[in-house]
C-alpha cells in the first residue's frame, strides 16, 4: 500500500509552490485548498521563514456567497433557509446578515419543510463524502502483488472458511459466503495457488421462501463456469424469526468445497500463524 504521506514526498517542490502562492497574496486557507494540504503542521513547514503579505487575497466565491446571503435575507429567509440554499455555515451567515432586519416568524409547516430540505442536503453531502473516502481508499490499494494476494487469501480463509476442531478434526478447505466479491477473491486466490478447477465443487444454500432457481443461475454466472454445482441445500422457514435477507437481492450463500485439500488446509493454517507471528514480532511496527 502506498504511504498516506506520499503526496508530500516532493517536499521542496511543494514548498516552492506554497511560497509562490503566498507571494501572490493568497491566504493560508487558500494555499491549503489549492495544494490539497490536510495538515497544518505541514503547511507551517512549507511556509517557514516566508513573511505574510500585507494583504491576503480573499476568495471571490466567498464574496459572492455573502452577497447572495444578504439578498436572501432581505427576501425574508431565515438562517436555516439560507444555509439550505447556499450550503454555508450559520456562523458565517450570521456575520454577513446580522445588520439586516429579521424576517417574520415562520409557521410550523414552513419550519418542517425547511428542516426536511436541510436534512436531505446533509444526507446528500454525507453520501458524497462517503463515496470520496471509499474511492480514495480504493486508490491507495492499487495493484496486488502475488505475495499480497497470497497473504490476503490466507487471512480471508481463516476468517471465513471452515476450520478443523478438536471435536471435529476435518482437514479440508470449505469456504461459505453470500458476498460474490468475497467468493471472487477466494477463487482468484485458489487460481494463484494453482488449485485444479476440476477439484472445485459448489453448492447453493438458500431459504425455502426464496427463488432457488434464480439463485443457482446467479451463482453460476458469478463463478463463470468454474468447477461444478451439486444439489442446492434448502433451509426450512422458521415462522418465529424475523428474516431481513429477503427480496430480489437475496441469493443465499455459495459453498465452495475443494476436493483433495488436506495438504492445502495445512498450508493455509501454517500461513495464518506465520502472519500472526510476523505481526506480533517485536520490531514489526518499527519497520519503514
Image (cartoon, rainbow, N blue to C red):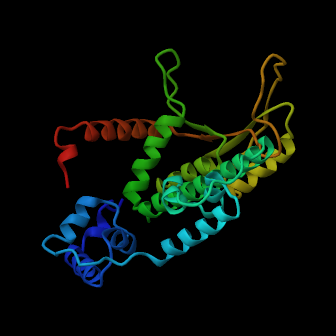
Give how far across and how far down residue 229 sits, in percent. 74, 45
Q: Is residue 196 visible?
A: no
**Residue 16: percent from the left, percent from the top?**
22, 81
Of residues 26 and 164, the one drawn nearer to the viewer in this rendering: 26
- Quarter of the image for the C terminus: give it: bottom left
Q: Quadrant of residue 231?
A: top right
In this rendering, position of residue 55 left or right of residue 192 = left
Vertical position of residue 283 compared to residue 1: above or below: above
The answer to whether residue 15 is left or right of residue 236 is left
Residue furthest to the left = 49
* Total numbered labels placed on residues in the image: 0
User: Residue 248 appears in which quarter of the rendering?
Assistant: top right
Q: Give the x, y percent position of residue 182.
A: 58, 47
Residue drawn at x 22%, y 44% is 285
Name the residue: 49% across, 21% down: 169
For the question of whether residue 135 can be seen, the reply is: yes
Q: Is residue 96 above or below residue 161?
A: below
In which quadrant is the N terminus drawn?
Answer: bottom left
Query: Residue at coordinates 64% horizontally, 45% vertically from top-left?
Result: 179
Residue 55 to residue 94: above or below: below
Q: Name the one closer to the observer, 74 or 57.
A: 74
Answer with the quarter of the image where residue 272 lies: top left
Q: Position of residue 287 (x, y in %)?
A: 19, 51
Q: In terms of depth relative to the viewer, which is nearer, 70 or 36?
A: 70
Nearer to us in this view, 23 or 224: 23
Amino acid at each position: 500500500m502506498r504511504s498516506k504521506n506520499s503526496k508530500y514526498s516532493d517536499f521542496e517542490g511543494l514548498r516552492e509552490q506554497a511560497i509562490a502562492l503566498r507571494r501572490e497574496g493568497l491566504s493560508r486557507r487558500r494555499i491549503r485548498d489549492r495544494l490539497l494540504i490536510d495538515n497544518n503542521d505541514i503547511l507551517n513547514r512549507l511556509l517557514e521563514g516566508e513573511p505574510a503579505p500585507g494583504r491576503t487575497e480573499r476568495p471571490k466565491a466567498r464574496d459572492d456567497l455573502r452577497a447572495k446571503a444578504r439578498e436572501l435575507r432581505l427576501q425574508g429567509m431565515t438562517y436555516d433557509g439560507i444555509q439550505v440554499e447556499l450550503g454555508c455555515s450559520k456562523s458565517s451567515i450570521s456575520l454577513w446578515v446580522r445588520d439586516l432586519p429579521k424576517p417574520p416568524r415562520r409557521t410550523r409547516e414552513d419550519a418542517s419543510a425547511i428542516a426536511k430540505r436541510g436534512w436531505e442536503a446533509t444526507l446528500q453531502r454525507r453520501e458524497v463524502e462517503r463515496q470520496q473516502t471509499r474511492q480514495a481508499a480504493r486508490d491507495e490499494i492499487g495493484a496486488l502483488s502475488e505475495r499480497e494476494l497470497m497473504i490476503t487469501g490466507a487471512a480471508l480463509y481463516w476468517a471465513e472458511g471452515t476450520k478443523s476442531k478438536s471435536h471435529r478434526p476435518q482437514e479440508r478447505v470449505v469456504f461459505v459466503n453470500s458476498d460474490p466479491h468475497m467468493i471472487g477473491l477466494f477463487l482468484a486466490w485458489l487460481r494463484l495457488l494453482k488449485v485444479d478447477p476440476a477439484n472445485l465443487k459448489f453448492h447453493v444454500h438458500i431459504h425455502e421462501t426464496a427463488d432457488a432457481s434464480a439463485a443457482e443461475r446467479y451463482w453460476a454466472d458469478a463463478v463463470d463456469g468454474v468447477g461444478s454445482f451439486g444439489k442446492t441445500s434448502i433451509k426450512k422457514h422458521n415462522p418465529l424469526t424475523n428474516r431481513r435477507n429477503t427480496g430480489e437481492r437475496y441469493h443465499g450463500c455459495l459453498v465452495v468445497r475443494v476436493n483433495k485439500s488436506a495438504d492445502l488446509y495445512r498450508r493455509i493454517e501454517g500461513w495464518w500463524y506465520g502472519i500472526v507471528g510476523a505481526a506480533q514480532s517485536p520490531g514489526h511496527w518499527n519497520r519503514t
